[in-house]
Image (cartoon, rainbow, N blue to C red):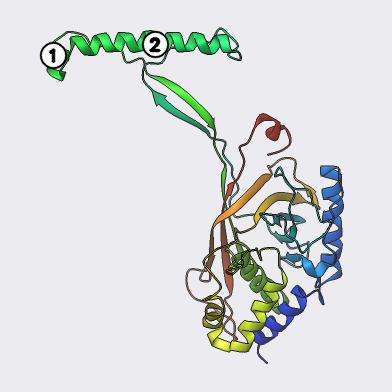
Amino acid sequence: MGWKGKAIKMGQKFLSGKTVTRTAALAGASVAIQTATEAIFGEPVIHPKTMSDTINLQFPLDDVSSGGMFTEIRFHSWKKGDGFQHNENTQTSTHKTDFLGMIRLPMPLQLSTGYQGNYTEGDSLSYDRRSAGLGSIDKISGIARGIGMELKNLANATANLSASAEMANATIDNNNMGMLYKGGGLRGHDFSWRLSAKNPDEQIAIQQIVHTLKWLSSPANPGHLGGSSDTDISTLTAQLNTLEAAGGNGAQALAEESRFLGGRLAIPPTCTVRFLVDTKANPHLFKVKDSFITNLTANYTASSGWGAHEDGSPMEVQIGLTMKEIRTITRSDVEAGY
């Protein structure tokens, strides 16, 4: 059995709960992260009944190679499923849903964030910034000012029925341009990681992480009876079994399996991101609210050309994630570290 076959076998054991972590260090890191999360958010993180129900992946496998700093990506189902009981985990959305697991990666190649409001330009605007702007009287005052400006514009348009008539004068009517605040914008994030394995175990970890990210960023096909399979982590193990049994035609086998399952798609899970230093959130950086993965890229020629091990596995893989938060950032969120 080649390296690839061993990778699939070990991947199945990992995701089925037979091998939850590869080393004692990884197991300790997982417990420490859970403890740190409880300390930060002030409530316990309750996992589903067995660890086989959750994803627990990390690269590199040791903490030393990353300098003790990790990017922690935690996944939650979009809607609460029926398969888990009492599994409410702390997350940033209004409603708590099923905890699917976590993936820990090194710090991204580039790290930045932005805060954008939704503004548009408007004509015939008159501001009154002296009042608080909270009551109906202020709204009535604004309506009255707006009506006055509209009447002025009507009179001007009547006097200048054509563009030629308007330009025949030495002046034109002031259109009173102004800015309209339409609400907060949604933050977007672009993260990328370049992963290079030091040994076969880390190559297996990279394969698992790439496959799992593909799986979590894609919709599920729940079939014509409805429902959702986005919380069914055992589906991931079943896919590995199908790929192994079908050999090189694994992708075609999976396509054939889902061809007649119906016309509805289950919404993919959401994820949150924290940047950790020694299992604690880095206070010098920022956190990411519940987000959808809007784009995932896996570059298998990250080293400016194809390079592979003897079994055909790439020498280096670069992962790119584009995320979009589902809720607006407010001042209270900024105070909380977002």
Which numbered marker is on residue 179?
none
Query: In the image shown, does 141 or 8 lie closer to the viewer?
Result: 141
- Characterize the local packing of mark 2: few (<14), some (14-19) or many (20 or more) Cα atoms within 10 angstroms: few
Tag 2: amino acid: Ile
Residue 134 visible, this angle: yes
Q: Is residue 62 left or right of residue 194?
A: right
Q: CA–CA distance between discs 2 and 1? A: 25 Å
Residue at the bottom extreme of this rendering: 1
The picture places residue 293, in percent across and down from the top left corner, at 58, 55
Relative depth, front residue between 310 and 12: 12
Q: Which residue is mark 2?
A: 147
Query: Relative to 149, does residue 237 appear above or below in the rendering?
Result: below
**Apparent side of residue 18 relative to residue 243 in the rendered image (left or right):** right
Residue at label 1? 165
Mark 2, mark 1: which one is toward the viewer? 2
Q: Position of residue 32 (x, y in %)?
A: 86, 56
- Note whether residue 198 is visible: no
Label 1: state its secondary structure: helix
